Image (spheres, helix red, strand yellow):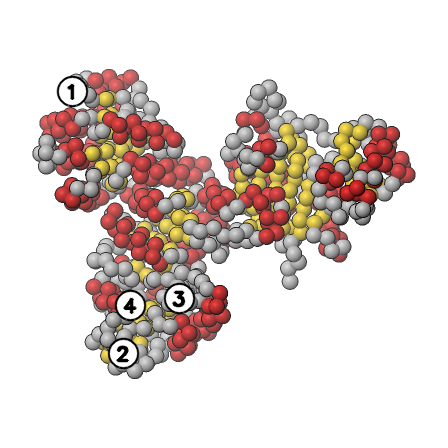
Amino acid sequence: MSESIVEQFKPLFEPKTVAVIGASAKGLALPNTFMRRIRAFGFTGPIYPIHPTASTIDGMPAYKTLADTPLPVDYAYIAVAGALIPDILKAGKGHVRFAQVVSSGFAEVDEGRDLQEALVAAARESGMRLIGPNCLGLFSPRGHITFAEVGPQPVGSVGIVSQSGGLGTDVIRRGLQRGIQFSGLLTVGNCADVLPTELVEFYFADPQTKVVGLYIESAKDGRRLFELLREAKAKKPVVILKGGRTKQGLAAAASHTGSLAGDDRVWVALSRQTGCVLVDTLDQFIDTLLIFQQLKPHTQHPTRRVCLFGNGGGTSVLATDFFARIGLDVTPFETPAIEALADLHLPPGTCITNPVDCPVGTLQQEDGAVAEKILDIIFSQGQPDALVMHLNMSAFLGRSKPEVLDNLMAAALRVLQRYPHKAHFLLVLRADGDPDMEARKRDFRIKALAHAIPVYDEMSNVGQALAALQWHESFCVSRQ
Amino acid sequence: MLSTQLIKQARAQKRLALDEKAGKAFLSEFHITVPSSTVVKDEKELEAQWSQFSPPVVLKVVSPDILHKSDVGGVKLSLQNLEAVKAAMALMKEQPGIKTAKVEGFLIEEMAPPGQEMVVGGYQDPQFGPMVMVGLGGIFVEILADVSFRICPIDEQDARQMLSELKAVAILKGARGHPPVSMEAIVEVLMNIGGEQGLLMRYQHDIEALDINPLLVSATQAVAVDARIILRAHHE
């Protein structure tokens, strides 16, 4: 196969033509929704509904089989009764590049194993690549394809493969809320033909993708995954959310070593040998993808030393404990930095040793100009690898001019410009669920993200994301 | 190659694992130090071979029916002279678990110099292929499961990291008055087992699992004192 992997998958991520199988003439089935969604998402190419009897569906001319469409089909979205699908594929022989089978009832249940084999055989003999079955679909901003209900989205740099469809939807919707922009997200279900590792290979080669995320339940081709990641030497960060546990072979359990292994050991080994980041929860997955999307890893000097600056004494203390527990260093500044901060003659109640903990009063002073002086000293003399600015928005309520947040961020941006590439800068916006405050937080988050600043909801989230960044950076340093 | 021969032989005899003698010969082919040993059928053979040994020696029963030799009284350590070996052999033959088993002979083996007990192992993960493991022996492996794994092949940096992530690594470096052990010797064993040219990669179609337990590591060397090599069900 001489075609590069990027070329091979281009018709999937940027299809010129889309066929939809399973749309109803009454317009009520999932495929009808899919057609509406991709139009709303900006897909302007031909959509070919395939239907045995209807002449039009949702106002578009329908075709009897996949072979009858005016142009060959780059991407076929299939959601009909499973038993019908092998013949549907065979009818489109040589006319379809990628067929995604959303329907279930295949090898995920015992009685569906034969049907899945028939499905794979039909796809192979018809010269098409099969995605799924038992998945939800594709989300590809560059190709204007989406299975999830979202508004228009820019093309981003985070590429995802998910073995679960529902979780894929969560990643898209929650990720977008948090500011993640995707280069693609494919749900692969049973992986009967196209394997997650092929997508990893695609994302590695795809210039648009900077970070790769995987949700894996069972690594069918674990060996290939290992080899791919090892070869890539963590050039692009890879974040793996591992779900489910596979049973080890019985023979392995018969040996002492095998019985000690369990499933997790393999994944831990994979992570240590290839630098990929293992996470346990959906929140961590999104937090970690976000940090890699927003920040350029320091591959010469891993992040260890973190300086904290914000309002909230207890929050600072708890964060210091948590950060220390996960391998981040929040020890106090050396004397010069402390002396420089002391020279600012900050009001009583301000702690200046790292964490720098300022009551709201201090942050408000001179419309945030004091904050700029503090940040400048931390950057120039505090030796930070990363600086986390945390703002408890509740404390600003009713006592601060609304623009104080903007002033604080403007101050931070000026300091960042003065010390380019010196330290990672991250923001934590702590809110309490009050609707007005959440709305303000959302606006502020968007502004910060536009300046490449990752924004987190809590200190523990930013801590875990920094630990993941540290893991990746340390691997890069150790393998240079 | 001798190692391939050993597997063929075991398969021809319908064994599921290499016996101890064959297992050690196999390791030896991969440059892993094993104690010098020989198998004798009876007292007469023992007498004929005795001059090649420098005591103390270990005596172990050899039987395909016995998987855990020490459980049936089939292991006797620290035998200082021929008379002691003979007496131990006579006693062993009378043990209930041995009397009824098919006994192929007795293994006489020089005792390795004292050192830290380690375990090194490997197995085939159904998805990821060969895996290699290391840990300290005894309670560290059995109760604390303080072991680390890697996917094969490993390089030397991987091998060193495996050791450094053991909770008990301080013991290897010489904690509480214990002399430090040779990390290099362990790394070498790990490479011979799990490296690109190692045993697990080269024989991944034949070896299902492997336990070296214990690997006795002193300040200068690592000796595989006991080894179990379990064969893979024959592939087509």
Q: Is residue A234 above or below residue B109?
A: below
Q: Are marks 1 and 4 on the same chain?
A: yes
Disc 2 on helix, strand or loop? Answer: loop
Q: Residues within 10 Å of mark 1 (few under 14, many from 20)?
A: few
Upstream in the sequence, badge 1 or badge 2? 2
Q: Which mark's residue is nearer the viewer, 4 or 2?
A: 4
For the point 79% across and 35% down, the residue is B59
Residue with the mark numbered 2: A62
The kind of residue tagged 1 is Pro
Disc assigned to residue A104: 3
Q: Which mark's residue is nearer the viewer, 1 or 3?
A: 3
Q: Residues within 10 Å of mark 3 (few under 14, many from 20)?
A: many
Please say whether residue A179 is visible from this viewpoint. Answer: yes
Q: Give x and y (percent) for residue A276.
A: 42, 44
Disc assigned to residue A347: 1
Q: CA distance from mark 4 to mark 2?
A: 16 Å
